[in-house]
Image (cartoon, helix red, strand yellow):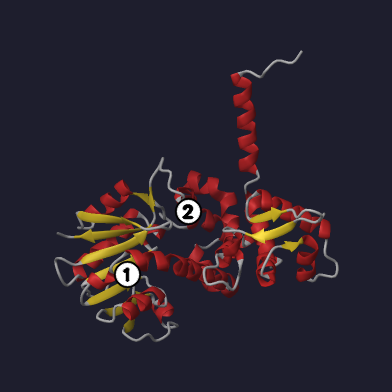
Amino acid sequence: MSTSPSKKQNDAIRGQARFFELLHAGLSSAALRCALKLNIADIINSHNGPMTLSQIAQGIGSLSLNVGGLSRLMRFLVYKQVFDETHQPGHEEPLFALNECSKFLIQDAKNTLAPIAMSFTEPLMFAPFYNLNQAIEEGCTAALKTYGVEVFELFSSNPELNKVFNQSMACRTRFELDAIMSTYDFGSLKGTLVDVGGGIGVILNEIVTKYPHLKGVNFDLPHVVSSAPSYEGVTHVGGNMFQAIPPADSYLIKSILHNWSDDKCIQVLKNCQKSITKRDGKVIIVDIILTPGGNDVFEASRINMDLIMLASFVGGKERTEADWKTVLEEAGFPYYNIIKIPTIVSIIEAYME
C-alpha cells in the first residue's frame, strides 16, 4: 500500500529538480547557438510559414545531416518555448513555426539578437566563468586568470573575437535605441550634448538627426573615434574620460559606468561636473538598475549581467538605486530622476542643483 510523500520528501524532490535545472541551464544557450549555426529560424522565415522537419532538413542542405539529431534539437527548443510545434490532422509530421522568441534569431532582421547570442556562446568568451571562484577568492577578474590579460587587451589582439564582441554591442545598442528614443525627450536639451564613451557615434547620430538643434560631440578613445564615420551635426573627439571630458551643456553616458568600480565612475562623473557649462545642465546615464526582489520581466537578465561584470571587468558591477545614489552624491550630483523604459536598462538624469 503506497503512501503520499511527506512535505519533507516533496521539498527534497523539488530541490533535486531545481538543482538539475540549474546544472543543465547551459544547454539552452548551446542549443540557441546550434540553431543559429544551422540557420533554422532563417529557413522557417524564408518559407513564410510553418515547416516540417523534413523541409527544415532540406533547407539546411547538409548531405550527411543527422535528421534524428535535428529532431531532438527541435524537441528541446520547442520544450524551451523557442519554437512552436503544431500537428495537422491526417499528417504524421509535426509543423515547426517561429514564435515571439525565435523571431529574434532571424539573422537579417532589424531587431535580431543573433549577434548577442553568438558572442555570449563563443567558447573563448564564456571561458572566464570557469574561473569565477578565483575572482572571488583572489579579488582579481576571472578574465585575467583565463586570458592572462584583461578583456579589452584580449580584444585588441584578437581581431575576430573583437569583431564578434563589437557586433554584439552594436546589436544591443540598436535594440535598446528605440526604447530610449521613444521614451526620453532629447528635444528638451539645448546646446551641446557629449556622448561619453560613445563608440563610433551610432546613438548620438540618431539623436542629432531627430533633434538637429543639438550640437553632438562623440567622445571616446582615439583609436575608437578614428574609425567612426562622418555624421552631420556630430564631431568626433578622442581622449580619456578619466583625465578630461569636453565641455557641454549635457552629457550622455550609456552602458559605460557598469564596466568600472565606484571610484572610477565617480572620477568620470566629476570630470563631467567640471566641464558642464551650465549649473542646470544634466548627465543622462543609461544603465542597468538592479531591483532585488522585483518581478520585472528583465530582472533575471540584470542579475545575470552583474555576474558577467564580476567575471569580466575589474570593479565592474550592476548597481541598485541606492548604489547609484551613493556614486552620484560623491561625484557632486545630489539630485536625480529615474525613468523606466521597456528594456533591460533605465535612464538616470543626474543634476547638480
Q: Is residue 149 visible?
A: yes
Q: CA distance from mark 1 to mark 2?
A: 23 Å
x and y, in percent, of residue 264 in the image? 33, 59
Mark carried by residue 241:
1
Q: Which residue is mark 2?
A: 305
Q: Nearer the viewer, residue 302 or 176?
A: 176
Determine the secondary structure under disc 2: helix
292 up-or-down from 82: above or below: above
215 up-or-down from 167: above or below: below
Q: Nearer the viewer, residue 265 or 58?
A: 58
Q: Amino acid at mark 1?
A: Met
Q: Quadrant of the C terminus?
A: bottom left
61 up-or-down from 90: above or below: below
- Crowd tier of the residue under label 2, counting other residues whose Cα lies within 10 Å: few below 14, some 14–19, many 20 or above: some
For marks 1 and 2, give the one nearer the viewer.
2
The answer to whether residue 289 is left or right of residue 349 is: right
**Residue at horizontal 31 percent and vertical 65 percent from the top:** 184
